[in-house]
Every structure is written in C-alpha cells, then in structure tokens.
Image (tube, coloured by chain):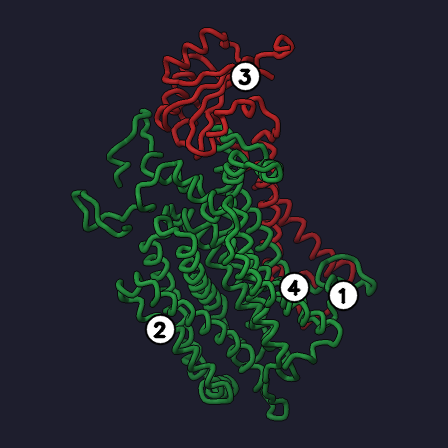
Chain colours: A red, B green
Amino acid sequence: MTDNKKTWGVLAQFEDAPGLLRAAAGLHNAGYRRFECHSPFPIHGIEEATKEPRSRLGYIAAAMALIGGLSAISLMGWASAVDYPLVISGKPFFSYQAFVPITFALAVLFAAVGTLMGMIGLIRLRFQHPVFDSDRFRQFSDDGFFVSIQASDPNFDLERTQSLLASLGGNHIEVLTE
Amino acid sequence: MAIQPHNHESASLSEPPLIAGNPTFRSVTDKISRIVEDKTRLNWYLAIAFTGSLMLMMFGMIGWLVLRGIGIWGNNIPVGWGWDITNFVFWVGIGHAGTLISAILYLLRQKWRTSINRFSEAMTLFAIICAGLYPAIHVGRVWVLYWLVPVPNQMEVWPNFRSPLLWDAFAVGTYFACSVMFWYVGLIPDLATLRDRASTRMRKVLFGLFSLGWRGGHRQWKHHELAYLILAGISTPLVLSVHSIVSTDFATSILPGWHSTIFPPYFVAGAIFSGFAMVISLAIIARKVFGLEDYITLSHFDKMAKIMMVTGMMVGYAYVMEFFIAWYSGNTYEVYAFRFRALGDYAWAFWIMILCNVVVPQFLWFRKLRMTLPYLFVISILVNVGMWLERFVIIVASLSRDFLPSSWGYFKPTIFDIGTFVGSIGLFLTLFLLFLRFLPMVAMSEVKGALPQAKVSAHGALDSDEARK
C-alpha cells in the first residue's frame, strides 16, 4: 500500500561537520529553503550559510521577566500597603528597597519559565516525524550528519534534489514518506 | 595522559586537550551512555543501600520531630537556630559551585567546563533539596508552612515582604526552579541520544518523552543554544544573589557577630569555596569508579583547585576583616562577640575552621598537590568540614552570647541533630547515585562540540590549525 503514502522528502547523510556545512551552503545557493541539517552538536556557520534569522526567544524571555517583576511589585505593594497594612519595625508600607530581592527573584523565575516554554514551542515539538522512520537517522544523536529536504519546498524535484544531494557529498540518500 | 604537552611550537604555554585520549564522536557517546545502559553493578546497590538507610533514618527522625516538636533538637533560648540553619546554609552554599560552573564559566567561554558541568549541576539540585528541607522542618509546625507563601490564609494576614526570611524562601525557590530548567535544557540532546540507543520499550518511551522529539535540526539547535545562553545569563546573577539574600537573614538583625555589611560577599565567596570542595570530592570518586580519566582530566582538577584556593583566601580575608571591624568600631558588644568567638565556649570550632579554611587551602599553591588526587581529596573534605564549622560558629556562637548575661546560653546537639544532618548527607548521596545510574553524567553533545574535529571554518573546510589547539 505504498501508493497511499505521500513523499515527505529526502534524507541524506554526510561525512562530517564541514561536509554538512558545505551541503547547507550548497542547498541554500541552489534556492532550497525547507531543509534541515541534523547534527549531534550545534555547528556554527550553518545559520550564516543559510541566512537563518536569529531566534526570537530573547524577546519572550525579556517579556516574561518584565511580567514577573511587575507582578511581584504589584503583589507586594498591594498586600503590604493596601489590603492589610501592618507597621513592622517602622518601615514604610510600600518599602520598595525591601521589595527588590523578591522582584528580582520573580523576574528571573518568569524569564526562566518563559525561556523553557518558549524553546519547547519554537523547536516544533513532534514525537512522530518522518525522519524517525529512517533507521540510519538514529545516528544523528551519535556521530551522524544528515540533511532532510521537504517535498513541499518549491524547488523540490525527486530526481534533481537527489542528484544535487549526491553531488554535494551526500550518501545513503533515502526517500521519506509521510 | 592528559597533561602531556603536544608537539606544537608553543608547547610549554598551550593548553592541554580538553578531553584526553583522542576520542571520536562515537567513543564519547559509547563511553557515557554505557554508564547508564550497562547492567547495574553490585557496588552501586551496596552504596545506595547504605546512603538510602541514612536517608530513611533522617525521614524517621523528621517524623519524630513533627510529632514531638523542635525540643528534640538541642535548640534553646537564646540559641533558637542550631544545626538546622547551619545545615541549611551549608547545603545551599554547596549548590553555588554547580551554578558557577554551568552558568558563569559558560558565559566566560571556559570550554573545560563541558565535561564537569552536568554532574556539578546535578550536585546543585540535590544540595538545594537538602537545604530546603531544613527551613521547612525547623518551623516546627510544618502543616502551616504555607504561611510563607502569599496565598490567602485563615488569619487574613499576608507574609511580611519586608523580612529577609521571606526573601530567602523566594530566592531559594527560584534558584531551585531555574537550576532544574537549566539542567533539563542541557539534557535534552543527550536524552535524545539515549532514546536513539534504547533497547527496551520503557527506555524508548521515557527518553522519547523527555527528549521532546529532538531531531538535532539546525533550527532546533538555534533555539536550544539561545535558551541555554539565556538560562546561563539569568543563572549568573543567582550565583551572587541567592547567598547574599541568605546572608541578609543574619546581617539585617542587630545581633553582634551578625550585624555586618560584609556578609553578602563573604557568604558568596564561602559558598563557592565549599561548593568547589564538594565538586572536587565527588568528581574524584566518580572519575575513579566510572573510569572517566579522559574526561575529567588532571587539568580540570588543577583549575577547580585554583578557584577553590582563590575563594578560600577571600573567606580568610573576611575572617580577618570581621575582627578588624569589631576592634575598629569600638563597639563593646561587637568586640566581646569576637573575643568570645576566638576564645570562648566555641573556640575549638573556630580554630578548626581557621585551620581547614585558611591554612589548608594554602597547600594548593603547589601545582604538584593540585594534581595529586589523594591530597586534593583530603583537602576538599577538610574544606567542607571547615565550611560547615564556619556556619556553626557564625550562627551558634553569636546567638549564645548577646547583650545581657542573663540571656546567655549554651548549645549542645542531641542525637536527633546529628542524625538529621548525617541523614541529609545520605539523601544527597542517594539522589546523586540515582543520577549517575539513570542519566548521562557528562554532557555528550557539549563534549562533542568541543572536540577538535567539530570545528569548522567559515568556508566549511576543517580548520586544522584551529583544530590542533
């Protein structure tokens, strides 16, 4: 029943980290955009070679830090100066100096939660993915370097894409189905 | 071995390789994953049986404490804080080295941290767990612990946000949460490695779940690396802030011996000092047991010992400064408090502390001793003893003598004090043993990224000049 299965894309293995970087640059130059380079560790240079925009995670973390800090101040100010003011060692009800540690702690906590959640959102969590169907792909977390190209890329053509991958040094080229 | 100079023009000045024994990517994966995957060794069972018993003893004692109250400890009036808070400060201090290694050394691009950051971060987590236990149980009526948290309670009073004790609850809570998240983000690629190697269904499911469908794609790495960097960035001030806030528990009081502006930096230096001592003790054992000589090299110990020596001297400076300020202030009570500290009831603790924290680290000036592990092990244990005594001296000696002779007292630990402390060491080691057995203790993906063959130049060619460095 292979007819029912749609081609998802092509997977190719590369020799080493420099090989993967060359392949990324080659594919980008050939006009491909919807491809992913899989490696056991981050390879610096792929972002530049593929003109990948910077991650937006920093904005998420900063926004969350702001929310955390502001909610800490409002909580403490409201609780100690509005809802139930208590005179404690003659300090002002809204003693912002004393609020600094908790404001800082909650800003940090919110930023950390935002970073973790933001990252999980941005890395496109998928437990089932066509690349996992390949037996070879398992090596990516050990010492394998792979490129996967999606069939949805406008430049994708089963024959030409495979030969391009081969000319860039790709081995064990596989067609993946959805 | 690790410290051989290699054939390079500037051999005498060049750094030794981060990982010895010329590993390949695969050998790194194999070596570290095997520790998790191989059959459990008998020694591990024996070790965890021992530490687990200590832990259970502690839980039993805590149960008794909840039933009977704080009176089963040696705490009295005036010494309302005894071993409980001593242990709290001791454990929370130990955590700081892990965060320093994983966050500050990351920001400073100290690549040698890659092979020790995972387990020193684990140490941080477990130390904070042990630390958090004491404030929780020392309140006596543990069932009203939620009064610390700003939730509406039956008295309709909010917690006092102007009190350092409450800051402490937030600081330590945040510290633990951030450390867990930082640790977990670093673990994701390694959990994927274990998922891809998994042979049993349970491993596949569990590692698959926790590795979040990691595919190592370059866009995933992009977000992952930034997340790691941000978490390192926000954990960095925590190294300084958490123990500073702990020190304000003391410094904002009016008690002679506590009321001092030097406390925040003094406590932070002490925390890093004791934390590195603990990392060194654990690393020496783990390296030997799991044969990680190529990963945790003598050069790692050399560097850690240097940090330990520097922070130890900061602590020594603070000891001297406290005495100087007591004398220089001309305050009768302050002078008395420090005379009592050095010559009074707890002088034995004070002088052992000076010996362990000031004299013993001076041996680390010698490179030979920094790189001879049996000596280093003894030194690190002595530093831990000294740092525990430091907190004991600060807390108990200051409390036992305040302004009026009629309110003087003497603290003597009971069997429950001792048992609860020894049991917390058991808890710490039990958690550590579980970690060593079930999770990769060295960050594989980070180590691979630091190997020479991982380096690529801008043109995509292997930059052999860079690689050799």
- Which callout, 1 or 2, points at the residue further toward the start of the chain? 1
Looking at the rendered structure, the kind of residue marked 3 is: Leu
Residue that badge 4 annotates: B166
- Residue A90 seen in render: no
- Which callout, 4 or 2, points at the residue further toward the start of the chain? 4
Q: Chain letter of disc 3?
A: A
Looking at the rendered structure, the kind of residue marked 1 is: Trp
**Which residue is more in the foreground, B426 or A91?**
B426
Q: Residue at x 59, y 58 (%)?
A: A100
What residue occupies the far left of the structure in this picture? B9
Marks 4 and 1 in Cβ contact (< 8 Å): no
Measured in 3D between alpha carbons, the distance from the residue under mark 4 to the one under mark 2, in whole angstroms, is: 36 Å
Residue that badge 2 annotates: B360
Q: Chain letter of disc 2?
A: B
Give the answer, above or below, for where A19 lies relative to A42.
above
Name the secondary structure under disc 4. Answer: helix
Give the answer, above or below, for where B278 lies relative to B187.
below
Please check whether the numbered discs 4 and 1 fall on a single chain.
Answer: yes
**Which residue is more in the foreground, B305 or A105?**
B305
Residue that badge 1 annotates: B143
**Which residue is more in the foreground, A96 or B342?**
B342
Please check whether the numbered discs 4 and 3 fall on a single chain.
Answer: no
Which numbered marker is on residue A176? Answer: 3
What residue occupies the far right of the structure in this picture? B154
